[in-house]
Image: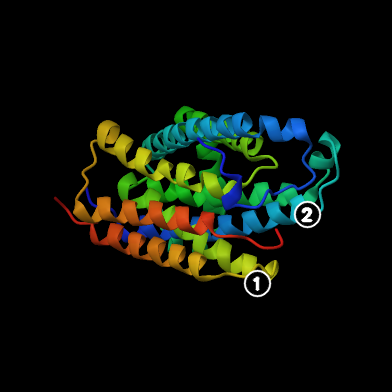
Amino acid sequence: MKPDAGSKPLSAPSLSETELGNKSSSARNSFLVVFFCTFIGAAAQLLIKKGAGQLGVHLSLTQVLHDPMLVLRFGIRILENAKLFIGYSLYGVFTVLMAYALKGRELSRLYPIIALTYVWVMGLSVLMLHEHVNTFRILGIILIVAGVSILGGSKVTGA
Amino acid sequence: MNTPMSSIILVLFSSFIGSFGAVYLKLGAEYMKPGVTGILTNYRLGFGIALYLFSSIFFVMGVAQGELTILYPMVSLGYLWAVVWAWIFFKEPFGKSKILGLVLIIVGVACINLGNVPH
């Protein structure tokens, strides 16, 4: 990763000389942490999907809106399932790592990496859940990854 | 296996509720006091996390049936709500690139749904 300071203004103009010197290595570190996070996020998704299937409860939004207590009861079922519990815990790890990696850094450049989660989830669904993909699904994922990257890369003024 | 509409609706509903979680996390970050106690006593942050957990119940309900290759990409529509709430609540402007990004996401999600056919 080449630091190209010319293409974007430094987010914090008050950076000292040593902080500037460490900038490229810490940028690479957060890049790696976020990249690693996308795998954790995808693994968590897969565990949540597997655990959800094990619950054997099929509800629709209409049913839930008619009987809101169903949400509470379903929430308790979630806590009792090992796969869901581990999946949620991985999500907690994912969130903390992400917060660490993104702390005080420009988030926009890392969105294309974060969006890779959609690719890993599709790949893992095919490998582990034996789901099928078709042209529409692959095209959809490509469009979503491009969309998230462009959206995240857009300048936020006053943030 | 085909993904039922009820699952798709539940996942979309979950991402809608979750987007309010993001609003409260952002509010919490704006009113953040330093230190660990600052995080723990930040009720906006707490409410944001609670909303995320609440929304995840609907996500789990949704993915109990159907395919993850269809349902997981639906989560990306949450970005649509995020941009709308950022505009309404935080007066964040959106330019051409945000609109282009959102259009790509919406077309992508529509594409995924077109791919929701039995094989």
Quadrant location, the C terminus of chain A: bottom right
Would you say residue B41 is visible in this rendering?
yes
Give the amino acid type for the residue marked by disc 1 in the picture.
Ile
Name the mark on residue B13: none
Chain at tag 1: B
The image shows residue A104 at horizontal and vertical percentages of 70, 42
Picture quadrant of residue B10: bottom left
Establish if A144 lies above or below A94.
below
What kind of element bears circle 1?
Answer: helix
Horizontal side of B111 relative to A75 (left or right) equals left
Element at label 2: helix
Q: Nearer the viewer, residue B27 or A59?
A: B27
Disc 1: which residue: B88
Q: Position of residue B36 (x, y in %)?
A: 82, 34
Q: Is residue B40 above or below residue A143?
A: above
Asked if labels 1 and 2 share a chain, the reply is yes
Q: Of callouts 1 and 2, which one flags the residue occurring earlier in the amino acid sequence?
A: 2
Q: Which residue is mark 2?
A: B30
The outermost residue toward the front is A6
